[in-house]
Amino acid sequence: MNDLYDRHRAVLPDWLALYYEDPIEITHGEGRHVWDSAGRRYLDFFGGILTTMTAHALPEVTKAVSEQAGRIIHSSTLYLNRPMVELAERIAQLSGIPDARVFFTTSGTEANDTALLLATAYRRSNTVLAMRNSYHGRSFSTVGITGNRSWSPSSLSPLQTLYVHGGVRTRGPFAHLDDAAFIAACVEDLKDLLGHTRPPAALIAEPVQGVGGFTSPPDGLYAAFRDVLREHGILWIADEVQTGWGRTGEHFWGWQAHGRSGPPDLLTFAKGIGNGMSIGGVVAGAEIMNCLDANSISTFGGTQITMAAGLANLNYLLEHDLQGNARRVGGLLIERLRAAAAGLPGVREVRGRGLMIGVELARPGTDEADPKAAAAVLEAAREGGLLIGKGGGHNTSALRIAPPLSLTVAEAEEGAAVLENALRAAY
């Protein structure tokens, strides 16, 4: 294993992050479990950064990929593509956006990049509103709107970005307010900001901030924002790369917790729909989607083999009500973790919804982030046979828990017990 690590370091960038002091190579998986090259089995509570949405080695997806590979793997968007049309039809109907059109990409980064292109072209403005503590990808444009210093390597950007309050409920200048007052204060902040700038193209927001540590505002914040945005003709882009497909349990899309004022103008997706295959995309109404006045294609977006995987995965998700399972099992898991954390001085908050749960750590007796403890818990959980993620704002001190949506009650209990032991070892 050390040989592979040495080879990795010799040919790949230093900034390509690896988990664990002794990085592991995952060789195969089944259900909610994966195995490393030493043959050790782990319960997977991170799913390849929320990509393995249904299960590892799901037979229905494996079969669809194999059969499609035996016919044709790829032809590009220059030719008619039946699997792409079929998946686009399903997603357009599920999106909630009227007269929807779908454009497929290969990643969430590329999806958000495309949404920014559409919004700025449609509005003829390169000013974008984004949320503090946000993350939207690693391309030049998406780095420029990412409100998380740990993931923003450059201040250069083709966009002028203005950051809005509201994505983090329990930190910042409005944290002490109740939910209604919090929303009102954030709305007033937005109105004030709009009075000091040229008209923005769009607001882009994650309903639940992913890399930011699974933080979210009170339900209804983005609906209240949308009322203000609509008065100015500003578009709303919902970044559903991590929240989509029922992961939050209560809703199929994260934006639906903020749906009082209607759906977003643009919706971006990726990760879970491919169950590990490279699928991303944008949904928008026809007027916005068709606003570009030059040709465009996607060489690998919508390629047949990934579309076959997406169709099979989406069918499985809907037929087995994995959104309902995320609500039920996720509800049990978050309560179990809250009970485990109740007597631990370093656990600042256990938050989330469905199977998207964050455990934020702080130095005992303070409100300061504790990234060293987060790293220690990550290592201890791995030693206990559990894989989790981490994230957070000013410092990486939130544990990220996002298992495949087919997680069983027994597996939730098993993972919670391992995580509780890891937390107790740290505190």
Image (cartoon, rainbow, N blue to C red):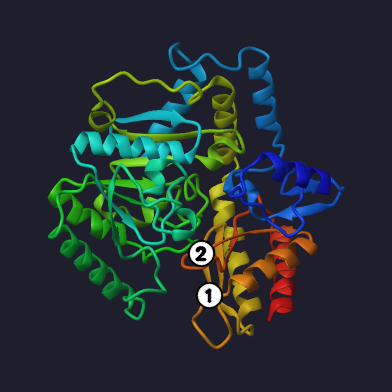
Whether residues under marks 1 and 2 lie with C-beta atoms below 8 angstroms apart, the answer is yes
Residue beneath the point at 51% across and 62% down: 213
- Which residue of the protein is positioned furthest toward the right in this rendering? 39
Dot 1: within a 10 Å radius of its alpha carbon, few (fewer than 14), some, or many (20 or more) residues?
A: many
Residue beneath the point at 23% across and 28% down: 291
Residue receiving disc 2 = 392
Dot 2: within a 10 Å radius of its alpha carbon, few (fewer than 14), some, or many (20 or more) residues?
A: many
Q: From the viewer's perspective, is residue 400 above or below residue 95?
A: below
Q: From the viewer's perspective, is residue 215 above or below residue 103?
A: below
Res. 384 mark? none
Along the horizontal axis of the image, is 65 left or right of 367? right
Residue beneath the point at 62% across and 65% down: 333
Q: Nearer the viewer, residue 261 or 121?
A: 121
Question: Which quadrant does the C terminus fall into?
Answer: bottom right
**Could you give the CA–CA distance between mark 1 and mark 2, rounded to whole angstroms?**
9 Å
Q: Secondary structure at mark 2?
A: loop
Image spot of residue 131 (x, y percent) = 34, 58
Q: Nearer the viewer, residue 122 or 140?
A: 140
Q: Nearer the viewer, residue 319 or 173?
A: 173
| Amino acid tagged 1 | Ala
Image spot of residue 5 (x, y percent) = 76, 47
Residue beneath the point at 32% across and 75% down: 174
Image spot of residue 375 (x, y percent) = 66, 67
Q: From the viewer's perspective, is residue 179 above or below residue 225?
A: below
Where on the picture, by quarter, is residue 189? bottom left
| Amino acid tagged 2 | Gly
Where on the picture, by quarter, is residue 57? top right
Residue receiving disc 1 = 369
For residue 336, say whether it is visible. no
For residue 233, say whether it is visible. yes
